[in-house]
Image (tube, helix red, strand yellow):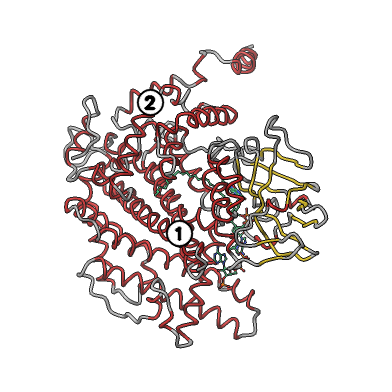
Amino acid sequence: MNQSIKPGDNPDLTEERLSGTFDTNSMAAVIYGSDKLAQRRREISEAVSRIPELQDSKPCPFMTREEKILEGSRKSAILNRLLPGLIDLDSFEETVFIHQEVIGIEGHPLALHESLFIPPIATQGTDEQQKKWLGRAQRREIIGCYAQTELGHGSNLRALETTATFDISSQEFILNSPTITSLKWWPGALGKSANWSIVIANLIVHDKNHGPHPFMVQLRDEKSHEPLPGITVGDIGPKMAFNGADNGFLGFENYRIPRENMLMRHSKVTPDGGYIRPPHAKIGYSGMVRVRSRMAAEQGLFLAHALTIAVRYSAIRRQGYLEDRSREVKVLDYQTQQHRLFPSIARAYAFIFCGFETIRLYDQLLIDVQNGNTSGMADLHALTSGLKSVVTHQTGEGIEQARMACGGHGYSMASYISEIYGVAIGGCTYEGENMVMLLQLARYLVKSIEMIQNGKSKNLGPMVAYLAANESEIDLNLGPNEYLKVFQYAARSQAWRATEKFQKLRNSGMSKEQAWNQASVELTRASRLHTRLYIMSTFINHVGSVVDQKIKKVLIDLLNVHITYEVMDIGIYVQGLLSSDQMDLIRNQLYVSLETIRPNAVSLVDSFQISDMQLRSVLGRRDGNVYENLFKWAKSCPLNDKDVLESVTKYLKPMMDKSKL
Ligand SMILES: CCCCCCCCCCCCCCCCCCCCCCCC(=O)SCCNC(=O)CCNC(=O)[C@H](O)C(C)(C)COP(=O)(O)OP(=O)(O)OC[C@H]1O[C@@H](n2cnc3c(N)ncnc32)[C@H](O)[C@@H]1OP(=O)(O)O
Ligand SMILES: Cc1cc2nc3c(=O)[nH]c(=O)nc-3n(C[C@H](O)[C@H](O)[C@H](O)COP(=O)(O)OP(=O)(O)OC[C@H]3O[C@@H](n4cnc5c(N)ncnc54)[C@H](O)[C@@H]3O)c2cc1C
C-alpha cells in the first residue's frame, strides 16, 4: 500500500495512491539500499518536524543571500547541539540527510566540511595528523573547506600555481599565490565561514616541483575569526544557485605552516628535505574520486525531488479533455506528459542504484589502498568520471522537463524546481567539468581497444570485456538482456570508431595531442554510450536481485520504460543492427510500458519519501492541496506586505500624474 495516504488530501492524489500496486515503505528500502536507512530517514524527518527552531523562518525564495547564509548557520549551530540525540553520528548518510532536511539544497557553511574537508584528513593524513585534527573537525570546533581550483585553472590540475616551498631551516612550508590567476577561487564555505582548509599546492623541495599535494592550512584566527596575516580571503559573489553557500577566494603571501601540516600518509617530506613518492601518482586525487562516486546517488535524488513535484502536480492538475467532456482530465493521463516524466523516473531509480554501487566500490578501494593495493584506482577513476558526467547531464535535462511539465506554475519559485535545477547542474561543472571527465574515461576505452588490437583481450576488466565481442544480430523478444546487447553494440561500435579515428590521425603524422583533440567529439560520444550501458546493466542486475515479488514486478515495468526509451534515444548508433521494423517494435513497447507504469507513477515518486520540509515546493506537497497553498504563498510574498510600494509613489505615480496634464 501507499503509506502517504492521509485524510484531507486532494482526492485526485488519494485516487492515484490507491491505484498503486506495492508498498511504498518496501520500495523505499530498495531505493535506499536497506530497510534500516529508509526507516531512519522517516524517523529523522518526523523528529525534525517536531522541533520548532529547526523550521524555515520563511520560504527560501523570499530570502536574500545574506539571510540564506544566516539561516544556514543558525540551523547548523542548532543541529550541532541536537545531532547526538537525532542521528547516528558515525553515519555519513544520516548526517547528509538531516542537513538537507533541515537546511535544504542551497548550501550551508558545513556542506563541504563533511564531504571534502574531513575525508582527506581521514584518508590522507597520518595517524598523528588524524589525532590532531580529526576529532576537532568532527566536533566542529573548526570549520573546513577544500581549496583546489584557482581563478586561472580548475580542470587542469598540472597548471595550478599556488606553491608550498619547503624551508629546511625553519621546518616550514611557505605558501604563496604568485599571480592573480593563482588565487584559489570557488571553494565552498571558504568565503566567510571556514577557518581551516585543505589547500592543494605545488610542493617545492630543493627547487624541484613535485606537483599538487594537500596541506592543512589555518586561514582565520580561532578566536576573532579574522583572516591571519599573509592571507587574503573573501566571497566570490552570487551564483546561479547554491546561494546559501559562501564560495570564496583565497591568496597567500609568504604564509608559513609547519612541515607537519602536509598530509603525509602517502607522500612525505622528511625533515632533511627528502621526498618520498606516493604508491600511486594520482593518490592525491582520491578525494575527488570519493565525491564523484557519491554523485550518481546525489543527482538521482535531485532528479527525484523534481519528479516528486511534477508527478504529484500532474495528478491534481486538470486541463483539457479526453473522451469524457464532463470533466477535465488529469494532465498525467496525456501520453506526452508520461513520455516527458516516466523515463526520468526510471533514470532517477537507475542513478540511485548506480550510486550505491559506486559508493560501495569506493569504500572497497579505500580499504585496498590502505593495504597498499592501488590496482583498482584506474578502473574506478574511469567509471566515476563517466558516471558523474552522464548522470549530471541527464539529471539536468530531466529536471528541466519536469519544470516544463508543470506549465506556468513550474516557472514560479513556488514550484522550487528552478532552484533544484540550478543546484543540480552545478554538478556538470564541479568535481571535474563533464567534457574533461568524459575524455578521462575515453583514455581508458582507447587503451582497452589497444589491448584487444594487441591480442590481449584476456586482460580486459569485466566492464570493458564487451568491447571485444562481435554481435551482429539481435532477437528483440527476449527481454532486458537483449536490449543490453543492443546497447553493447552501440557502445562498442562507437568506441572502435572513435579509437580508429584517433589512430588514423596519428598514423597520418599528427601529434598525439592534436589527433586526440580532433577525435575528441567522437571520443566523448563513446564515453557516454559506455556509461549509459553501465547504468542499464546495473539497473538490470539490481532489479534481478530484488526478492519482494510485488516490488520486483513494478521495477520490471520501470526497467521496461528505461530500456525501450534508452534504445530509442540512441537509434542513430544502432542503425546497422536493427531493422526499421525492429525499431517500430521497440517504439511500441515503449508506449505500452508508459501505460503499464501509469497507475504506479505517484507511488513510485512517493517511495523516494522526500518530506514536504525537504521538498520546499508548494506544487509538490504530499497532500496535493496546491491551489489554496499557492494563493497563501503568493500573499506571503514580501512585495505584498504593502498595497502601495515606494516604486509607485516615487516614480510611477508622478509619471502617470504628469502624463495626465
Ligand atoms: C548511500 C547514500 C546515498 C545517498 C547519498 C547522499 C544523498 C543525499 C542527498 C544529496 C544531498 C547532498 C547535497 C550535495 C550537494 C553537493 C555539494 C556541492 C559540492 C561541490 C563540491 C565541489 C568540489 C570541487 O569541485 S573540488 C575541485 C574538483 N576539481 C576537479 O575535479 C578537477 C578535474 N581535473 C582532474 O581531476 C585532473 O586534472 C584530470 C584527471 C582531468 C587530469 O589530471 P592529470 O593531468 O594529472 O592527469 P592526466 O595526464 O590526464 O592522466 C594521467 C593518468 O592518470 C590517470 N588518472 C587521473 N586521475 C586519476 C585518478 N583520480 N585516479 C586514478 N588515475 C587517475 C589518468 O587516467 C591517466 O591514466 P593513463 O593510463 O595515462 O591514461
Ligand atoms: C558550485 C560549484 C562549487 C565548487 N566548489 C569547489 C570547491 O569546493 N573547491 C574547489 O577547489 N573547487 C570548486 N569548484 C570549482 C570546480 O571544481 C571547477 O570549476 C571545475 O573543476 C571546472 O574547472 P574550470 O572552472 O577551470 O573550467 P574550465 O576548465 O575553464 O572549463 C571551461 C571549458 O573548457 C573546456 N575544457 C577545459 N579543459 C579541456 C580539455 N582538456 N579538453 C577539452 N575541453 C576542455 C571545458 O569542457 C569547458 O567547456 C566549484 C565549482 C562550482 C560551479
* Rendered image quadrant of residue 587: bottom left
Q: 14 or 362, which lies in front?
A: 362
The amino acid pointed to by label 1 is Tyr
> 10 Å neighbourhood of mark 1: few (<14), some, or many (≥20)?
many
> 10 Å neighbourhood of mark 2: few (<14), some, or many (≥20)?
some
Q: Earlier in the sequence, mark 1 or mark 2?
A: 1
Q: Which residue is disc 1 drawn over?
A: 362
Q: Position of residue 132 (x, y in %)?
A: 61, 45
Q: 50 or 81, which lies in front?
A: 81
Q: Is mark 1 within 8 Å of ligand 1?
A: no
Q: Position of residue 158 (x, y in %)?
A: 67, 63
The amino acid pointed to by label 2 is Leu
Q: Position of residue 167 (x, y in %)?
A: 80, 56
Relative to 504, say whether 241 is above or below: above
Q: Looking at the rendered structure, which numbered label has been put on residue 39? A: none
Kindly state the secondary structure of the residue where label 2 is placed. helix
Relative to 425, say whether 460 is above or below: below
Relative to 594, say whether 77 is above or below: above
The answer to whether residue 349 is left or right of residue 208 is left
Q: 151 or 221, which lies in front?
A: 221
Q: Quadrant of the N terminus?
A: top left
How many marks can you see?
Answer: 2
Q: Position of residue 416 (x, y in %)?
A: 44, 35
Q: Quadrant of the C terminus?
A: top right
The answer to whether residue 43 is left or right of residue 323 is right
Inter-mark Cα distance, 1 to 2: 43 Å
Q: Which residue is disc 2 drawn over?
A: 630
**Residue at x 51% of width, y 70% of height:** 442
The answer to whether residue 460 is left or right of residue 597 is right
